[in-house]
Image (spheres, rainbow, N blue to C red):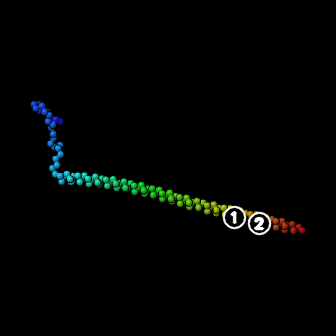
Amino acid sequence: MPSQNINAGTITPSVNPESILVDLDPEEDLEEIQRKAAAEQVRIEEAAQAKLAAAHEHIERKWKVKEEEAWKAKEEEVRKVADAWKAEEDEALRKKAKEDAHRWQLSVSCRFFCAASVLICSRC
């Protein structure tokens, strides 16, 4: 706050001498600036390392998801091949069963026919 000399009619500012920065030791000032710069550099490097680690984790998660998707696709492909093979096997078994049933029916029919023929011939 400025002080006022009532007798002189002039205003003189009051200054706190401790508030004035005086360069007492330029080397100390330089060292302080270097310490602050080094601390800022460390902070910047730590932040960069944190961002790099986060990016690395993100990439690993993406690769894991892609690997899982590829694995699921492979499993699905194997399942489809197994299902197709099973369907072919089932169809072959049905066909064989149908053929066996047809043979059995022919065999029964032939036996019946033969038995009937024998009975008819024996009456002759």
Spatial separation of the CA atoms under disc 2 and disc 1? 16 Å
Amino acid beneath label 2: Ser
Residue 29 rendering spot, x and y as whole percentages: 19, 51
The label shown at residue 107 is 2
- Frontmost of labels 2 and 1 is 1
Find residue 58 and report its image quarter: bottom left
Amino acid beneath label 1: Lys
Q: Residues within 10 Å of mark 2 (few under 14, many from 20)?
A: few
Residue closer to the observer: 88 or 109: 88
The label shown at residue 20 is none
Judge whether 29 appears above or below 110 on screen. Answer: above
Residue closer to the observer: 112 or 25: 25
Judge whether 74 appears above or below 4 on screen. Answer: below
Residue 104 rendering spot, x and y as whole percentages: 74, 65
Of pointers 2 and 1, the one earlier in the residue sequence = 1
Residue closer to the observer: 111 or 75: 75
Give the left or right position of residue 104, taking residue 27 as reference. Answer: right
The label shown at residue 96 is 1
